[in-house]
Image (cartoon, rainbow, N blue to C red):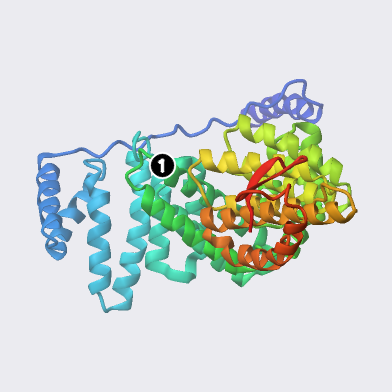
Amino acid sequence: MKFKSLFAVVLAAAVPALACAKKPKKVAEEAPVAAPVVEEAEPTITEECVMNVSLFHEAVKNKMYADAYGPWWEVYTTCPNANKSIYTDGSKIVEALYQAASDPAEKERLANLAVEMQDKRIRFFGNDPKYPKAYILGEKGLAYIDFYGESKLAEARECLQQSVAGMGVQSKIMVLVKLVDVSYALYKQDPNGKAEQFIADYELASNYLGEQASNTNNKNAEIAGKQKDYVDNIFAISGAADCSKLDEIYAAAVQGNLTNLDMLQKIAKLYKRVRCTESEVYFAACEAAHKLQPTQESAAGCASMAAKKGDYEQAIAYYDQAIKLAMVEDELEDVADYQYNAAFYCFNNLKKYPEARKYAQASIATLSGLGQNKGQGRCYIIIGMCYAATRLYGNDAKGTILNKTVYWAAVDKFVKAKQVDPSVEAQANEFINSYSKYYPTKEERFDLPGEFSGNTYYVGGWIGESTTIR
């Protein structure tokens, strides 16, 4: 009976509790107590560790990699936080042993070790101010390439891309180059799916290599310049630089980012770099960017768009804006190009010869200030063509003869063109041969003795230059 009574009491006590459990709770249940996080203790650096570091480091200096492996492995597995040389020397040791190994299983072990080593370096030395985590990720990406080849391209690209994103212009040159190489290999495997990624990786790497190459304080500037030429060539032959291919990728991107200035400017710069400035997508990006914040690129793009539509006056107005903005940015080579383009449209399309000369002379002055002769020749040819197209005098007998004097002045400019810029010599010679046929003849000059006395002649009007009688 006592047992039954006790059971009844317990049961009675439990019933209210069960009933309460069925009601909606007014407060949330307490979360289960989480297990305490136990931080892994830093490995102890013993005297033996220090001695082994010295042993393997000395062996590596003497390229005795097999001898270095024993003490290195002891340090790597017991006190991996002892010294950064565990990883810098370790990479050399593992690579040497990998090259010497013939057993596939051993080569696989060493390949895995080469990559794992970088993860461990990040754990213990990822906060190093000179070689931080982002730098080490670059080393990991290079390890994937060196030890796995094409079998782990995606993993390599991910590490390299993260490294460049973190290091920026301070990125290791080889990391920048290999980012383009790997991204190109992935693009070849999947041209439709990886084109945008390849273009973005190329643009990032090429920009940083360009900055490194132009930095006069960078001891590796020359190497960076050569590697930039290499990645630019890779991009040029890739097929991704084809204008129609770019249009497929970026047409929707432009329309979806009409208020995203940064994206629009990046797209416009890319199109300009690969000389796809006749593309409607390029025009759309420039026009949208110009509305948000005018830059030299957007102004130049709008100028090209206006010219393509036949509105040359508007094109020149945009070039005037581009010139001013490029001067502010100290991009004088661009200034010279814009000045030449304006000169060409004034001459070729608007027949405004004095204005064409003004822009051409300005371009010459800009290039001269930069110490560049190349590019000046085309400007002198424009001026010569303007002179040759001009009729300063009437249509009577005298005027017909005097009008021919402009060819002397024109040929002077063609001669000057090839003198300062040998790249235009063939074109200049062609014009010289063509227009020298129209000089005033001796008989014509004899008929106007008062006009042609001495060896020089002043060509008047807007030309206003003295020339040699021929």
**Where is residue 345 shown, x and y percent of the image?**
79, 49
Question: Residue at left 85%, top 41%?
Answer: 314
Q: Is residue 360 left or right of residue 254?
A: left
Above or below: residue 216 compared with residue 137: above
Residue type highlighted by circle 1:
Lys
**Where is residue 174 shown, x and y percent of the image?**
40, 55
Q: Is residue 154 left or right of residue 283?
A: left
**Where is residue 258 shown, x and y percent of the image?**
81, 40
Residue indicated by mark 1:
133
Quadrant into which the C terminus falls: bottom right
Q: In the depicted view, which residue is nearer to us: 102 or 221?
A: 221
Dot 1 falls on a residue whose secondary structure is helix
Q: In the depicted view, which residue is nearer to us: 385 or 135?
A: 385
Above or below: residue 43 compared with residue 415: above
Circle 1 residues within 10 Å: few <14, some 14–19, many ≥20: many
Residue 14: tell me if it is visible: yes
Q: Splitting the image into 4 quarters, where does residue 94 fall?
A: bottom left
**Where is residue 437 shown, x and y percent of the image?**
71, 67
Question: Residue at left 49%, top 57%?
Answer: 179
Above or below: residue 150 compared with residue 55: below
Residue 258: tell me if it is visible: no
Question: Residue at left 84%, top 49%?
Answer: 351
Quadrant into which the N terminus falls: top right
**Which residue appears farthest toward the top when viewing the image?**
26
Question: How many discs appear?
Answer: 1
Q: Is residue 312 left or right of residue 188?
A: right
Q: In the depicted view, which residue is nearer to us: 212 or 260?
A: 212
Q: Splitting the image into 4 quarters, where does residue 444 fall?
A: bottom right
